[in-house]
Amino acid sequence: MLIEVPEARFVLSMLWHYVAVTASQASPWFDADKLPTLIAALISIIIVLYTTYHRSSREKFKMREIAGLKAVEEAIGRATEMARPVLYTPGWGGDIQRPTTIASMNFLSHVAGKTAAYDCTLVYPTHDPVLMAVAQEVARESYARAGYPDRFRSENISYVTSSQFGYAAAVDGIISRLKPASIFLLGTFEAESLILAETGNSVGAIQIAGTDSTIQLSFFIVACDYTLIGEELFAASGYLSGDRSILASVRAQDILKVLIGLLLVIAVIWSTIDALSGHAGSGWWSF
Amino acid sequence: MKKIETRHWTFLGLFVCIGLVMLSDVKLDIPVSAQTRKMYDFIDSLPAGSVLMVSFDHEASSLPEIRPIGLVILRHAFSKGHRLIGVALLAEGTVIGYRLMLKTAAEYGREYGKDYVYLGFKPQYIAAILSMGESIPRTFPRDYLGRPYEQFALLREVDNYDDITAVISITDGSLTTHWMEYGGARYGVRVLSGMTAAMVTTFDPYVASGQMHSLVAGLRGAAEYERLINRKGGGERGMLAQTTAHLYVIGLVLLGNVIYFRSRRKRKST
Amino acid sequence: MNRKVALGVCFIFGLVMFAQYFSQHPTARSVNQAILEYWQIIFAFTLLVGVVSVFKNNVVQIRRGQDRSYRLITLAGLVAMPFLAFIWGIKADTPFMWVFENIQAPMQSTVFALLAFFVASASFRGFRARSIPAAILLLSALIILLSRSAIGTFIFPQMTEVADWIRNYPSMSARRAILIGIGLGSLTTSMRVILGIERTWLGGGK
């Protein structure tokens, strides 16, 4: 292989150095140390645009089944039969700028449409006033799209407090008093996750959770009925709604994962050879 | 009256176990881990007068765990003659950090303005971290008590992260990630952290990859650090409660599995 | 029209912040600094939205007679704290800080402490060795728990090393894989927002 040849590795590292120096000299505006990040970002942008807009890429592709998403309909149906509300909360850790919160809003759109159709109460407490405003608009639009704009109640989507455990106490209080039949815990959660999940468990609610925090994921897996792990949360709304742009993003993520995997394999082999041969090496993988 | 369920008994059991142990005078011998020693060695090896920024990125709720960590780090830094700049990126950490700095500085006879300054709270932590990378006086034109930045001898030497040896983030959440992503990756500032034990697994990959220099984890980390600086601060006492709770949970898990396997065997036999 | 303006502003600022990340030029850095300052000012105004919402919701619920006493306490706190702050300030040793340190902080610590009890009940309910992988997971959890207590090394001298190995190798590999997935999800979602493909943040609709 090319990288086994010391001369080839030397030439490649010199080439890399030349590109970086030229880039910084060509414009004092550009920080050459960030060249690898720029290349990675541009590749990612091209892949996202390709999967979103290229005709052949927009053909429908199959997503694997995700148990938590299949249970959404069942959860809302259960709440309707028991005449108890559905509670949906996005957690304390995120605000509207976080991608996880945006993924949660997409999910909310779907859940709100279902609760509108089934005439089931949707309760949405949140810690952020901007989130509250966005959630109200998302839900209002979903209710209107479902054909039931009159069923929307803006007072059910409320801001409680920005304090973490004030928020946890408030949501716990809502769960204890209203005893929702179904609880959706989707967004960025911190230490309040298990408090909410256990309280939901104590009232006998079916719980579907998803978060981007690996720690809180483990709490949710123990305490909730269904958990969306990692990027399943981002894929969730595409799975439920069939939204092409979200599905295109999922496809872009898959392509990027393959590229990252290839990069990892190449870097591992390269660094192993460098280490075994006693070569100083370029260390390009540690950018 | 509401029916007492199994979970109520588990709650009561935990309360009784910890209550009984805390009333006793048990002393624990806690060996020092490599993880805690790494931060200790770093702060210990810095030349006297090094400038460290300590950021109180936590809420009041985690005070029982965070306070021993903050105390022990501040004590070590002041004892070595380092100069500290205190900030808070979460509102609730503001007065807690201020009081901790005042208390520990007084223990070592440190002078405000010369040996340490407390700048107070800045909202929108990502913006604050990025902004300090450009200019700390522009981000905090006044200290916590409203006095101008230029008034202080320590601050006149500090313009941005280039003039700071390291940032120590005392946190109960994931705010340290932003220190690494924005302060470390963009401006090259070295990041250390004291954090609650629950957050350690989040940051292990960052320590392994070198993005974070080192961390002190939870009450155990605080207890280990107290041993290194030979000064108590609540960590060791807290470890007593923590150890009891851990043993109780282990007991519950084992009991739960015994019940599970017995009922499974019963179902198979019938 | 409003949505087009919002999308345009989002795209321009997204592009500017993306571009300035790769530059150390003084102009790029001052643009960055200015935008960050504006961000902090805008954030302060969003808090007003929250205050108005809390006030409105609680007044409506009080009129309906729902949980009246609790809601009156909420409103009393909402009014009292700014009053104390305006009159005496918010530095240490003011009435505002006394309320924070002696009422709010202990209440928050109390709710946080519930976590310990809930961990106990969740562990008792959830940790079952139903299969071989579950048994391995259970054993790993027990080792980690013991290593974080003070007596772990007395039971088994190499407890800490074994626990560190579990944390640093199998556990970290799994976490890194999940983090890569989450990172890619965040990346594509952020790009969709900047490029105007994702419009949920505008409040629903396409």
Image: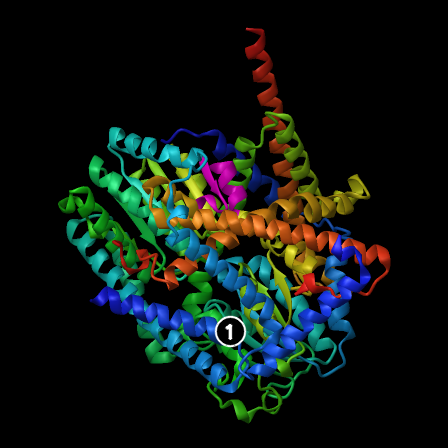
Give the residue at x 60% y 60%. Answer: B195
SS assignment at label 1: loop
Residue bearing mark 1? C21
Q: Is residue A48 depicted above or below B125 in this figure?
A: above
Residue A62 image-quadrant placement: top left
Residue B215, placed above or below residue B22 = below
Q: Is B196 on the left-hand or right-hand side of A224?
A: right
Mark 1 surroundings: few (<14), some (14-19) or many (≥20) residues within 10 A: some
**x and y percentages locating residue C29 in the rendered image:** 49, 82
Is residue C44 visible in the rendered image? The answer is yes
Picture coordinates of residue A231 (x, y %)? Answer: 48, 47
The magenta stretch spans residue A221: yes
Q: Amino acid at mark 1?
A: Tyr
Which residue is more in the foreground, C75 or A57? A57
**Camera-side residue: C133 or C202?**
C202
Residue A282 position, x and y percent, is 75, 66
x then y, percent, for residue A3: 75, 57
- Horizontally, is B153 left or right of A86 in the view? right
For disc 1, the chain is C
Query: Looking at the image, which residue is at 43% across and 76% down?
Result: C36
Q: Residue furthest right?
A: A278
Q: Is residue A213 magenta?
A: no
Q: Quadrant of the C terminus of chain A?
A: bottom right
Identify the residue at horizontal 70%, vertical 81% (top origin). B50
Q: Pick the residue in front: A15 or C167.
A: A15
Classify residue C193 by image quadrant: bottom left
C101 in relation to A91, above or below:
below
Q: What span is colored magenta in the figure?
A: A216-233
Q: Is residue B229 visible?
A: no
Relative to the observer, which residue lies in front, C90 or C133?
C133
Q: Give the side of residue B221 with respect to residue A125, left or right.
A: right
Task: Establish if B257 lies above or below A145.
Answer: above
